[in-house]
Image (cartoon, rainbow, N blue to C red):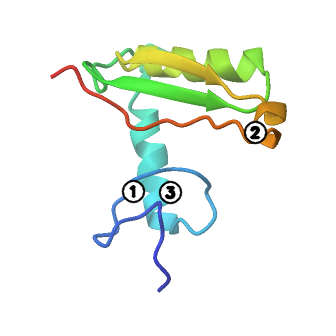
Amino acid sequence: MPRSIQINESGELVHLLTTEGIPKALMLRILDRANAFLDPKNPKEVVNAPLLDGKSVFNLFFENSTRTRTTFEIAAKRLSADVVNLMCRRRALQKASHCWIRSITSRR
């Protein structure tokens, strides 16, 4: 089996970049876990959870999309993360400028 940057040697999901190549059983576990975040009294509402408390999430965007940026930011904040949004324009990349994200850091 080819090495996947999404799934580690133990078959656990490390990064979700695409659904391509994700086994059906793992995809069903992801959907079941996502369902657990819905409020049972009002399924259209999402429950806030401290899963990323003390962590920082860096969103890197190559295109200006307010709706996408806002959606990612709200999702991270609902998981109690600190959020940093970075814009890196394609034109800057073409001029050999670089946008680098070194790591996701923890305050702990």
Residue 49 figure quarter: top left
The residue singled out by tag 3 in the image is: 27
Residue type highlighted by circle 3: Met
- The answer to whether residue 37 of the structure is visible from this angle is yes
Image side of residue 55 versus residue 21, left or right: left
The residue singled out by tag 2 in the image is: 93
In the rendering, at what x and y percent does residue 93 appear? 75, 39
In front of the other: label 3 or label 2? 2
Image side of residue 91 versus residue 103, left or right: right
Residue 39 figure quarter: top left
State how far apart marks 3 and 1 are (Cα).
Answer: 10 Å
Disc 2 element: helix
Say the numbered circle drawn on residue 74. Answer: none
The residue singled out by tag 1 in the image is: 13
In front of the other: label 3 or label 1? 1
Disc 1 element: loop
Sequence-wise first label, 3 or 2: 3
In the rendering, at what x and y percent does residue 91 appear? 84, 33
**Which quadrant of the figure contains the C terminus?**
top left
In front of the other: label 1 or label 2? 2
Identified at 34% across, 15% down, the residue is 80
Residue type highlighted by circle 2: Leu
Identified at 74% across, 33% down, the residue is 62
In the rendering, at what x and y percent does residue 76 appear? 46, 21
Sequence-wise first label, 3 or 1: 1
The answer to whether residue 23 is above or below residue 33 is below
